[in-house]
Amino acid sequence: MEQSPELIEFVNALQILHDPKSNQNDRQFAHNICESAKSDDLRAYRLAAQLVSASLPHHVRHFGFQLYEHLITKRWNALDTNSRAQLKIVSLEIISKWNADLLVEPRFLKEKAVQIVALIAKREWPHQWPSLFAELTSLSRTGDSHCELVLHVLRGIAEGMFDEDQLSDARRNELLVALNNEFSSLFAFCFQVLEEKFLYFQSSVDLEKQKAKCLVSAALKMFETYAPLSSVQVLAQCGLLQAICALLANPDLRGEALGVLQAICAKKCKDVPHEVVTNLVGSLLELCKGGLLQQTDFDFHKGLCIALTDLGQNFWSSFSSQQAIVEGYLSLMASFTNYHALAITALTTPFWRIYLDSQNPITGVNLPPQIHEALMATILDKVSCKPGSDWEDLCGVEEFSDFDEYFKFWGQVKAKVLEIVRKLSNLMPLNSIMFIGSQWQNTLQQTQELLSNGLKALDEKLDSRIEALQSVLENIMLGVPLVNFQNENDDVNGACKMLVGILLSREVHGQVVMASIVRMGLVVLIPFLRMRGGDNGLGAEIISKLLSFYDLFPISSDSSFASNPSRTSLNLADTITMRRRLSAAIVKLAHAMSAHLLPYRDQINNKVQSLFSGGQVTGEETSHLYELLFVLSNPLPSDADRAAFLDNIMMQPLAEWNDPLLTQAMSDPHSWVQGGIAGEMIPSDETYYNLRQVRHRIHQVLITLLCICRRVQAGGGGMGTGVLSPNTKNGSLYSISNHIPSILPNLSTLIKSIHTLWTPDVRTRLSQEWQVLYKPVEFEAAVDPSNAKAGNPAFDLQKGPFSIETRVTDVYTWIRHVRDGSYQLAGIISGFCDGFYMLINQNPAYLENILGLAPAMEHRHLRSILRLFVGPLIRNCPSALYMRILRPVLPSFLSLLLNRLDGGYKTMKDRDSGMSSVGAGQGTEKDDIIFDQILRLLHREVGELVLSLVDEGQGQAAIAAAAALMEVKNGTSQAEVDNQNKGSVTGTQQGKELTEFVLSCPDIGPMLVQLMCNTFIWPDSTASSRAMLSLQKVIPRVRGNEAYHQMLAGDLLGIVLLALTSKSNPLESIASEAALLHLLRDIYMNLVTVTPLVRQQLLRLPGINPAELDSVQETLLGKMMAEKKQRAMLKDLIRPCTGEEGADSIRALGEVVPSISRSAKNTWSEEQRQLCFEWLDAAEFS
């Protein structure tokens, strides 16, 4: 038949669109032609009828079907009745005239053709097209191709019913009702096709067999689509459920059958005939017993697991009365949980969660013991399979792009299965504990044999197994009902005691690995020990056993600073790690069993004291052991007992702290760096070792005192609320206050000696090898000694544990630890007001020792002492001693901070702009990064300090409220006593007194406000925001004091105006326009009437005249107005000046603050910044 020009044009356009070689212009032109067909309904209908001709290429016919689809989905409501009727006829004619062979026509074309009928049916059937199903049934009998198309049409009617936007809710409900009425006949027709074609599929071969398979697949797809819409009872009546089980046994059709099974099992139905579901479950179990799982692959297993999981969740009540079926089903689900792929394990967890939640341990648990044991063993294995070097073998058929993705998934599955463990142990606690107990015993025995045969470390697999045992045991303990632990005669308690006995009886024989395993097992038994730790002294036996490990694994007291030649570095590192975790475990167990340990307090205390006297504990271990003693002291019966306890534990460290040998060493910093002075003889190894031992004794005692004072400050052992001295005025704690005279003298001397090393006199005399101590990038010398060696050939003169390199690193590390620990201890004891400030008042030299050499300190040291000591010193000081203690100290210290930050930011600015002077900025880029970051951290600390001085105690009030809340949570009852002793001074009142003092003091207030102004301007947004808040609090308080007018109404207002009006805002990176307007409003409203400087600065802006200023002032001050409106008016006032440069006097502040101008853009990489932050984290003293 001859083609019309219009048809030829569209055929050519479609050819261009589907030709990958076509250029963009041609493709766009062709696209416009095709789209033009949709502009007119009649033209679209005419063209569609021509384009669907079987003689045309597939892509052309597909576009013809698209035009029909457009008319139905987009234009249906606009079509008249005749046009709709014609489209119905055409849609069925397309199927009836489909003469292509079933296996020849492409799938996409058939799907598009049947979609036309389905779309019309969704709009017209049943009322406007009642004969549709009869016509389709008749059409299906004309041939296999037509039968397949009819099945696709039926599937298309239900498919996407809830996704099509053009259908209203009413129309969807109408369709569902109509389909429900037709389900019986519809399913009967489809099942007949399914049955006939399956039998033909079994008996035929080659092409006929393939055709039959296509029809069976089409019928199954139709059932899969309709299953969510119909009832299980209707599906069962047509014989579908039995057919599904038969098809699952066929290798060629089981995939499609599984899809139908999944759709049926996913239904949440009520009142399902129990027999139907029971038969279905029984048939599936028989199939699996018959080898179905062995014949299929991972994808089929995954789909079957999904179906079985849904079946158990949605239909459990339908077959739960059949015990044989239940046991078979649970066994099958347990085998899926044990599947080698984690994805299938994860799929089963929702069923187990719902099933176990439905069980009642009182009325009886329907879970056979063998299933319980199989589940527990499976979960233990899954948790043991921690991804490591063999992760690709573990994940098997599961697709994961990298290790991190698989490890994350394993962690998610681990959390799910451990939840199942908690539920299992809640239902069957005795079985769970007996199972895990046997697993612990077997693993301990296996590990013991390996270690006895000379194994030094566990392999990855066994290590993961032990971690898994700990995790599973911990979750079992969390799941066991507390009532089981409360009943002394309960079998569960007997099983737990047996497990504790297994762990306690294990001899570690000096093996770090075995000691760690015992410690891990005991810690997770805390829920049991909290209840039964007092049975026959069980808790005390456990603590004593763990404390004995310190003797079994001794290390020198200075082991954290240098290696012991008698041990390998690996063994030493393992020992230190084990002891650190052991210390934490002892404290954790003691907290849980504190009530049970009281009768054995003296026994445990004697053991701890023997460890202290033996000098075989590190600083971190000391902290934990003193925490243990504090746990044992709570509760003590009386204030006198608490005081006696504190005096007892303070006796030994104070005696050692004031030992003449240590006192001499603290006052002689030269002995710390002996051999480091240029030209001085290097001491022998023996001499150096003796000096080193003394230094580390100092550090050990310092940490001990710090631990005790910190714990008392936190209220340990009831110490935070009682034990008040008879003469207390500020609630100081009696025992610590009494001991401060024994702590502070040597502490201040030690801090002074440390600071002495940074004075120019000492620094210039040290040899080149020791100058590394003063490198700004301090921590590198301790972490990586190669940095210390750079440029120092003398480091290669000696090797071994006492080489120059080792000595420098050791001394530096000791100084860093002792310096930060001393600052912390000084800050903490300043909180015990009676003892500390009374002593400082009597002997100001102690405070001079601590702060006198502050100008020699580096930025990081200054930040540390500011944060750890100076802040607490100022905030805790009694108001009666402000003039005596704070006034001599604050002016010089604030001036030091101002000069340090001014100089530091000037260095940054000059370096970034390439204007560094000769000899400056010679460090590496990494040095510069760390210098800048430390300077910014110091800047932020200064911002916190100035805010705390003027916030009128608001910050301290919050701290006091938090402390009071903590006392209430701890169950203390001393609040009234404390308030009586503290008098009427609250944290806020004391803060007001401090603010009033610093602002009224002529040599402190102006310096403080100058520091605030510069802190606001220096380039760090965090510190700047704190400074701005400080200024907003200060400005109203000093409006009547002329000493502040020039700084606030002159310099600060000038820089604010410059920032608001300049094209290049110098404060852009640290303060927004809104923040600057807040500050402008505060300055104007408070100072415009008390100093002419405000008007002078505003008049220097171009375009502002006196009359305009008078009008604005009269408006702002003459009537009540919201602050927001005041800021808006001031913004309107200076708006015409935006972009102008301003007067010279406004820019003059740049000379006062050289760093005001924006720094050049830095070139730091993200890697370099991360390196800096990692260093800062590592350098912080804990």
Image (cartoon, helix red, strand yellow):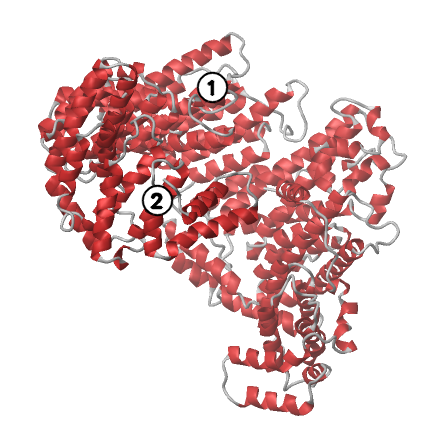
Q: Is residue 465 left or right of residue 423?
A: right
Front: mark 1 or 2: 2
Callout 1, which amino acid? Asp
Per the image, label 2 sits on a secondary structure element best described as helix
Q: Residue at x 58, y 67 (%)?
A: 1029
* Percent position of residue 333, x then y: 26, 23
Q: CA distance from mark 1 to mark 2?
A: 58 Å
x and y percentages locating residue 1104 in the rendered image: 69, 85
User: Residue at image x 35%, y 17%?
Assistant: 439
Residue at x 30%, y 22% (from the top left corner): 336
Residue furthest bottom as drawn: 1107
Question: Which residue is at the front of the view, 26 or 1067?
Answer: 26
Residue on which disc 2 sits: 50
Where does the image place residue 955, in percent across and percent down from the top left?
A: 52, 62
Q: Is residue 363 visible?
A: no
| Residue ranking furthest to the top | 453
Q: Residue at x 68, y 56 (%)?
A: 843
Residue to which mark 1 is pinned = 393
